[in-house]
Amino acid sequence: MDAFFAAIEILDNPGLKGKPVIVGAPPDQRGVVSTASYEARTYGVKSATPSRVAYQRCPHAVFLPVRMERYKHVSEQVMNVLHGFSPLVEAVSVDEAFVDIGSLLHRDKTPEDIAYNIKNQIYAQTGLTCSVGLAPNKFLAKLASDYQKPDGLTIIPSRPGEIEQFLAPLPIETLWGVGPVTTQKLQRAGITRIADLQTCPVSELTELTGLSAAWHLKEIAKGRDDRAVKTEHEEKSISNETTFYEDCRDEETLHRTLIELVENVGRRLRINSKKAGTGQIKIRYANFRTLTRQERLRPPTSSDRPLLQCALRLFEREQISQPVRLLGFGATHLLDPEEQRMEQQPLLFRELEYTCNPESGNDRALDKAVDTLREQYGSQIIRRASCAHLSQSTRRRTRRE
């Protein structure tokens, strides 16, 4: 979709048409831009731009808060249109999806016809424009969908030689998986265009990026991507983070915030019947230096107590000595119930249960009771009085290690 959040705001308030519209945090608070209209983008404002910076660049813009429920409602309309064309729809986000239309192709219906029909029906249902990329695979389709925004339709040829020719003049940062760090490494080596990647030997790329990344770069530089459209999105991680209104160095506030973040992640794990194999904290300092630290969870867990112990261990090892701007906690390497059964080893002696498995029956009962209370009465109905018992045990264990 084209500038989705901003476009919906303009649709609901036609008086905003033609004006720079910025959806996200207010300019007098910390936070970032969620979506900027194309009028605002001409001033260098885009998604993830700090709101204060956006205001400096475009002080006459209209700043509006995020109305996620409204956006989700429109998103459902869009996805319903896509499902009307094909059962193979992979929603990537609230405003973006892959659609496999291979089964729709007939002698009297070209891919271009289907793409135009999708655009027209989305506009008829929502009053909003979208940009479509038509290509043989997901990587190329994503690339094409960004090529002629807004209200664009870009068709990438299907023959290998023509695909390489289309990609050749594009900058390397266009490629999926090529971030700022990789871009700098390649540019220092004189590789600035996809054409340079297409002709660069794998041995030279390996010295710059490692063997696995080198093969990946060679494949996508030639437009190859074997990923199928997945109709069910499997969540690979669950995380939660907060940006402090003012930089924080108060240990008690940081601990309290970390506890709330961990409990939120634990609740989401239990709702989704997942267990985490790894816990991870994220700390961003006032100077924007960001670090992440992670630890394996043995055994995998969804219980608050072992998650909290993990988070506090990681946090205290950092010995925070400067103000913190952002704090986060995440759970990765998620296991579904079947994988959990395969991971779990029966215990020979029941009295060793808590020693070997920190997720005891008491912890599970406590988590369930707290989840029920918070679901009925709100997240603030019950809170941990202190993390001292967790923190002290963590320090003792850290000293032994």
Image (tube, grey):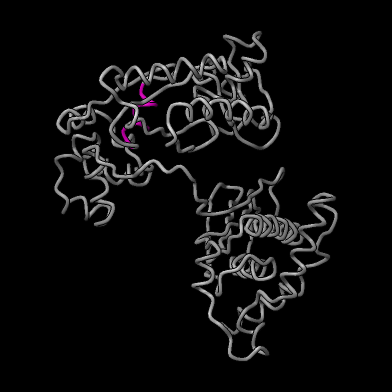
Name the side, left or right, on which 141 lies relative to 59.
left
| Residue toward you, 355 or 242 | 355
Identify whether 389 is placed above or below 7. below
| Magenta stretch, overall SS | helix
| Residue toward you, 136 or 386 | 136
User: Which residue is at the far front?
Assistant: 107
Give coordinates of residue 229: x percent, y percent.
39, 41
Give coordinates of residue 186: x percent, y percent.
26, 44
| Residue toward you, 247 or 367 | 367
Name the side, left or right, on which 23 lies relative to 135.
right
Which quadrant of the view contains residue 5? top right
Identify whether 6 is placed above or below 280. above
Give coordinates of residue 365: x percent, y percent.
76, 69
Q: The magenta stretch spans which residues?
A: 139-147
Name the side, left or right, on which 339 lies relative to 247.
left
The residue at 68%/48% (across/down) is 247
Count of numbered badges drawn on the protein: 0
Identify whether 126 is placed above or below 219. above
The residue at 23%/26% (across/down) is 157
The residue at 66%/45% (across/down) is 243
Which quadrant of the view contains residue 260? bottom right
Which quadrant: the C terminus? Answer: bottom right
Give coordinates of residue 4: x percent, y percent.
55, 24
Name the side, left or right, on which 400 lies relative to 168.
right
Residue 273 among magenta residues: no
